[in-house]
Image (spheres, grey):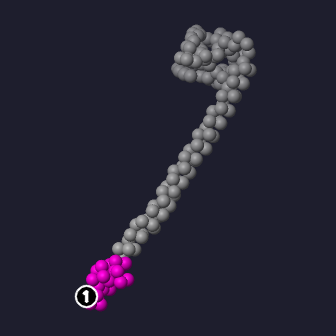
Amino acid sequence: MDRLLKFFNLKKMNKRERYAVIAGAAVIFIFIVARLMIYPFFSRTEHLKRSLQVKTTMLAQMRQLQSQYLAINQKTKLSTARFQQRPKGFTLFSFLDRLAGEAGIKDRISYMKPSRKAGKNSPYKISRVEMKLEAVSLEQLTKYLYAVETSANMVEIKKIAISKKDKKQGLINVVLQVQTVEI
């Protein structure tokens, strides 16, 4: 305390000035202690809180990605199993022709145009058949489409165009594009 009094020459100051200088020194001391000790502690705490939030968000995203991966993996296994269940020598053309016979519309087929497209850097090929059905009833078409879409052979109808043939009899013309993936 004597050093402080000598340094600031507090002995020559009146009592009020001494208290002001001591109060100012105390404020500066508290500020320095707060800046050097307390602020870094709270700053570190805030940094840890932000880091925890970021890591929690990342964990939630990772869990979501994991569930998506598992779903895709499950679909892949199902697709592989379906591919293996297909009869040997399966062709989309013969499959559609057979279903048309079962649905009773084989004689209504105007044309069937098969095509095949190989995927880039892939062992899979996309097999397509475009076919035109003339003068079929809506019931016949529904039966045929149901048989195509629900088959276990992973066949899908890509495009369909329907036009009326005869309004009185309720017959329609249909152009279908059906596709499947082949190995």
Name the element at disc 1.
helix
Query: Which quadrant, please, contains the N terminus?
Result: bottom left
Which x, y percent locates residue 13? 26, 87
The residue under the point 48% across, 57% down is: 47
Task: Read off the magenta span.
Answer: 1-26
Residue on which disc 1 sits: 12
Asked if residue 141 lies left or right of residue 45, the reply is right
The residue under the point 56% across, 22% down is: 158
**Camera-side residue: 24 or 175?**
24
Compared with 48, 166 (above or below) is: above
Q: Main secondary structure of the magenta part?
A: helix
Q: Residue furthest bottom?
A: 15
Which x, y percent locates residue 51? 51, 53
Compared with 182, 30 (above or below) is: below
**Camera-side residue: 183 or 60?**
60
The residue under the point 69% across, 21% down is: 83
Which x, y percent locates residue 24? 32, 78
As for residue 61 lying within the magenta part, the answer is: no
Q: Amino acid at mark 1?
A: Lys
